[in-house]
Amino acid sequence: MKTLRPRPVPLSALELTPEEGFVLSRIDGRLSTRDLVALTGLDERRVEQIVEKLAGAGAVVLEAAEPSGYLADSGSNPELPGTSDEGDVTSLADFAAALGMDPSSFAASHPEPAREAPVRPERIETQSGAMPVAAELEEVREEEPPGEEEAIPGDVDAEETPSRDADERTYRALYEQKWHKLTTDERVAAAKTASGADLLALCFDAEARVVGAVLENASHGLEHARLVAAHHHTSVGLEILSRRQDVLRDVMVERRLLRNPQAGDIVLGRVMGPKRVMQTYKVAIDREVPELTRVKARGMLRQKFQTSTPEERADLVLRTEGRCLILMTGCTFDAKTTQILCGRPFNSVLFIQNLAKWPATPPGLLAHLFKQPFVRKSAPLKKLLLQHPNLPGDVKRQI
């Protein structure tokens, strides 16, 4: 491979084409023809022809085959330091000697050659014979005691895990194989004394007597109550479960009872009774709850709304931006609730629209909404408030 370097020659003395002048302008130091091909983007044969013409004109000096200055080519030349063909690495002293400097001022230590990564064997020898490495690792992993997952208090979504679903399918299969063929009295007697997987399997029984026996078992816990709440389909069995107030405090048991379409009025009353107005509203609009349960929850919501404190009613209306008023058919605001709402400024379009569309909005609250600067700047909101039958006449006359 040829190397070349420029010579100080006046360009006016050279008769070059634009292409040759371009190649000459790229030569700003010692380069090889390969470097020149990379710089110009021309074909290698064409570059060699131009270089020969430039050398004949005296614009460049051609030299013998020498390295191009790249590190990859430095190992092939024993005169320059670098990496040799055998992979040896030169020291700083060799670089200093090549540059004409005193090598004694540099450390003569060679860098430690890179170590190759050990090759992982496909098979290893064990006491039981040769076996694949992957199998050995799996065997060691199985011997380690599995750690218990940290439960998140109040996490309802934790019930919908694949592992839990797989366990429930296992318990149901055990019930079908072992307990389903027995008589009801035999299953009741077994539910009072069983434990472990057998007791969990009996939670899938369709008889309310068996469910009562499971709940009377001394070893039963929240896991058994959760299975009964989700998979039992008789109102009597669910009513037996709802008698246990300690069980109803569990969020997952409560959630599964509400999702169970067989939960009757007694069960819903025990579940929804301790709830406040805001929690009842969330159940009434929950799409995962059956429609019949939501209808019953809306009736309970209206009853609680009428008997709750003014602060709770105002808080529900404010936090839902008035969306709860759609479910409040036949309900009204008392004077205290109206006073609380009138003491706040409003700039929410949705909140004002919901109050303007609710037939029972008090006149004082409508007058307060009409005075808001946000409403005065919005013609559609003013028109909507003017159409309400409870808007005071003096407000209309001021327009």
Image: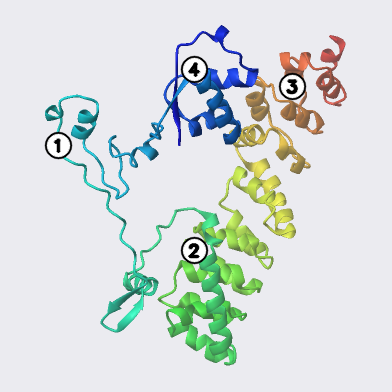
Q: Give the residue type that dot 2 points to.
A: Val
Mark toward the viewer: 2 or 4? 4
Q: In the displayed structure, would residue 291 be above or below residue 356?
A: below
* Residue position marked by numbered label 4 in the rendering: 58
Front in this rendered view, residue 306 or 62: 62
Foreground tag (2 vs 1): 1
Residue 108, which numbered label? 1
Q: Earlier in the sequence, mark 1 or mark 4?
A: 4
Q: How far, Cα to Cα, is label 4 from label 3? A: 102 Å
Q: Are marks 1 and 4 in contact (CB under 8 Å)?
A: no
Callout 3, which amino acid? Gly
Query: In the rendered image, which residue does mark 2 sit on?
Result: 247
Q: Residue at the location (66% across, 42% down)?
A: 305
Q: Position of residue 399 (x, y in %)?
A: 85, 10
Q: Foreground: 384 or 138?
A: 138
Q: Residue at x 74, y 21 (%)?
A: 364
Picture residue at 88% right of the left edge, 24% below the top: 387
Tell me whether the residue at label 2 lies in contact with that at label 4, contact meaning CB atoms closer than 8 angstroms.
no
Element marked by disc 1: loop
Residue linked to disc 3? 364
